[in-house]
Image (cartoon, helix red, strand yellow):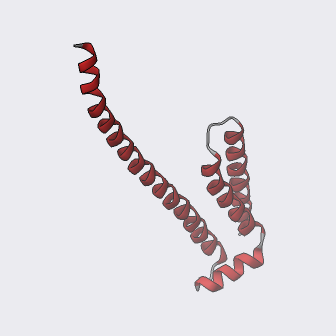
């Protein structure tokens, strides 16, 4: 159990460091980094608190705390991936709406441009 907790601690610290350095170099936007930083902090908290891990295992009805920890890790990342799926869907909808608005503007501007050339 200690090896798993230590491995998860190193993973979460690496994730936090990677997100902060990417944020500093402007490779990731702030609104996207919040989810990853939150996930890293949740994983760090779970990996460093054996009593919280034991409580989580009993709340889930799992007798093995490391298994409960792995289930919690999976749940955290599924939540982050779901959040990004919603963001991508919203961006796609906004992109479609913007494309349609540009097409309407071009439709209205083209006859005026052709009249000015004639």
Residue at figure coordinates x 63%, y 85% from the top left: 59
Q: Which residue appears farthest toward the top when viewing the image?
A: 118
Image label count: 0
Name the image quarter holding residue 114: top left
In the rendered structure, the answer to whether residue 110 lies left or right of residue 93 reads left
The residue nearer to you, when weighing 78 against 26, is: 26
98 in relation to 71, above or below: above
In the image, residue 118 lies at what x, y percent?
A: 22, 13
- Percent position of residue 55, x then y: 70, 82
The image quadrant that residue 12 belongs to is bottom right
Residue 1 placement: quadrant: bottom right
91 on left or right of 9: left
* Pick the front one: 43 or 82: 82
Q: Nearer the viewer, residue 26 or 11?
A: 26
Residue at x 64% of width, y 81% of height: 57
Q: Is residue 43 left or right of residue 91?
A: right
Q: Position of residue 82 (x, y in %)?
A: 49, 61
């Amino acid at each position: 159990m200690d090896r798993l907790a230590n491995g998860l601690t190193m993973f979460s610290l690496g994730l936090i460091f990677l997100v902060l350095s990417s944020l500093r170099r402007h490779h990731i936007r702030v609104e996207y980094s919040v989810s990853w930083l939150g996930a890293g902090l949740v994983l760090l908290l779970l990996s460093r608190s054996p009593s919280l891990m034991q409580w989580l295992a009993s709340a889930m009805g799992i007798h093995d705390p490391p298994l409960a920890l792995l289930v919690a890790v999976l749940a955290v990342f599924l939540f982050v991936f779901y959040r990004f799926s919603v963001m991508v869907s919203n961006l796609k909808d906004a992109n479609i709406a913007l494309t349609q608005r540009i097409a309407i503007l071009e439709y209205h501007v083209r006859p005026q441009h052709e009249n000015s050339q004639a």
